[in-house]
């Protein structure tokens, strides 16, 4: 498998001179498993992935949405290959609150917020609503399958986490989830023995508690800390931890410091940056 990060920021894009090292685009991760193309979330990083994929059309892709908060869907209307007939895009997500994934993606492109409607996108789109614990097996070429298991995190309006397995390797994508006083047993199970755990490490413990940074306590906002990330990685027996969904308030130096502190408790930690590629 090959994992590539196209957007690693949480909440809102943060371009500018203070974020060039880690990048300012919101959540989007590409996973290649055999010849299967999987994409996790459609934040603004998806636009850049779309530019690369435009040279490889027609293609079939599977986009898994963790949930439909803005920072996970805003790149979708700018995903160029979705406008090109011949491409096939399977979209997976939860039926959040009162709308399906399709209704939500169409809603963000409705007049007067956006000039082009979802129905103007000419690629073939197939929508799939997921349920907790669902296991999908997709063709990955060469007689192999890639297996995707759906789990649930702890986030306002709900969030899906995913475990991807292919050819003896595994990756877990668990963003936008708040830790509990004890390690989340569902995520520890989902991430058991995984090669790579990509996890919400939006805050430092001090930012989370409200003793540092702006805005007071972040308890109940649905995000985690690098400290809880390191603990989950240890409990699950993950080999590598990728700190993901950096807070928009964190500049490059702050993310670097966060990475350094995470490494002290879990040496296999790395802070996600745009372009980071992991081969398994
Ligand atoms: Zn988010
Ligand atoms: Zn969210």
Image (cartoon, rainbow, N blue to C red):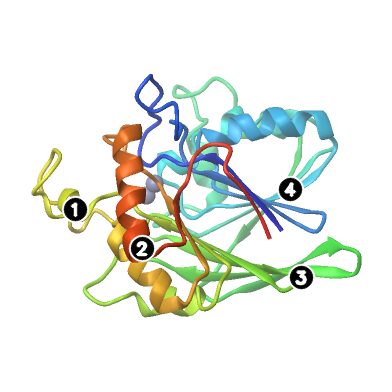
- Disc number lying in front (2 or 1): 2
Q: Upstream in the sequence, badge 2 or badge 1?
A: 1
How many numbered marks, from 0 up? 4
- CB under 8 Å between discs 1 and 4: no
Q: Nearer the viewer, residue 105 or 185?
A: 185
- Which residue corresponds to mark 3? 167
Q: Nearer the viewer, mark 2 or mark 4?
A: 2
Q: Quadrant of the C terminus?
A: bottom right
Q: Which label is found at residue 229?
A: 2
Would you say the beta carbon of the disc 4 residue lies within 8 angstroms of ligand 1? no
What is the CA distance from the residue labelled 3 to the residue labelled 2? 26 Å
Of the pair 257 and 81, the residue shown nearer to us: 257
Quadrant of res 122: top right
Q: Quadrant of the N terminus?
A: bottom right
In this rendering, the answer to whether 174 lies above or below 75 is below
The percent coordinates of residue 100 (x first, y second) are 52, 54
Give coordinates of residue 26: x percent, y percent: 46, 37
Asked if the residue at tag 1 contacts the one at tag 2, i.e. Cβ–Cβ closer than 8 Å, the answer is no
Q: CA distance from mark 3 to mark 4?
A: 19 Å
The mark found on residue 208 in the picture is 1
Q: Residue 7: x and y, percent?
A: 51, 38
Q: Mark 3 vs mark 4: give the one in front.
A: 3
Mark 2 element type: helix
Check if mark 1's residue and mark 3's residue have beta carbons within 8 Å. no
Could you tell me which secondary element the residue under label 4 belongs to? strand
CA separation in Å, label 1 and label 4:
36 Å
Q: Gap between marks 2 and 4, in whole Å?
A: 29 Å
Question: Which residue is disc 4 drawn over?
Answer: 61
Q: Earlier in the sequence, mark 1 or mark 4?
A: 4
């Amino acid at each position: 498998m090959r994992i590539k990060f196209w957007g690693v920021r949480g909440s809102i894009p943060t371009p500018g001179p203070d974020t060039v090292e880690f990048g300012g685009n919101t959540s989007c991760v590409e996973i290649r498993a055999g010849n299967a193309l999987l994409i996790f979330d459609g934040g603004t990083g998806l636009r850049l992935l779309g530019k690369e994929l435009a040279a490889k059309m027609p293609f079939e892709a599977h986009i898994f949405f963790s949930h439909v908060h803005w920072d996970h869907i805003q790149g979708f209307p700018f995903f160029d290959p979705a406008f090109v007939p011949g491409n096939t895009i399977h979209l997976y997500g939860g039926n959040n609150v009162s709308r399906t994934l399709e209704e939500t993606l169409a809603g963000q492109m409705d007049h007067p917020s956006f000039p082009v409607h979802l129905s103007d996108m000419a690629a073939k789109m197939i929508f799939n609503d997921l349920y907790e614990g669902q296991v999908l097996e997709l063709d990955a070429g060469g007689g192999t399958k890639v297996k995707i298991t759906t789990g649930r995190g702890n986030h306002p309006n709900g969030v899906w986490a995913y475990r991807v397995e292919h050819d003896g390797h595994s990756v877990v994508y668990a963003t936008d989830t708040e830790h509990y006083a004890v390690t989340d047993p569902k995520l520890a199970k989902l991430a058991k023995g995984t090669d790579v755990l990509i996890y919400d490490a939006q805050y430092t413990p001090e930012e989370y508690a409200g003793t540092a940074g702006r805005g007071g306590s972040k308890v109940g906002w649905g995000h985690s800390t690098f400290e809880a990330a390191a603990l989950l990685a240890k409990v699950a027996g993950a080999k590598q931890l990728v700190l993901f969904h950096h807070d928009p308030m964190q500049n490059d130096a702050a993310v670097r410091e966060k990475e350094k502190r995470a490494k002290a408790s879990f040496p296999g930690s790395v802070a996600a940056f745009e372009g980071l590629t992991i081969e398994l």
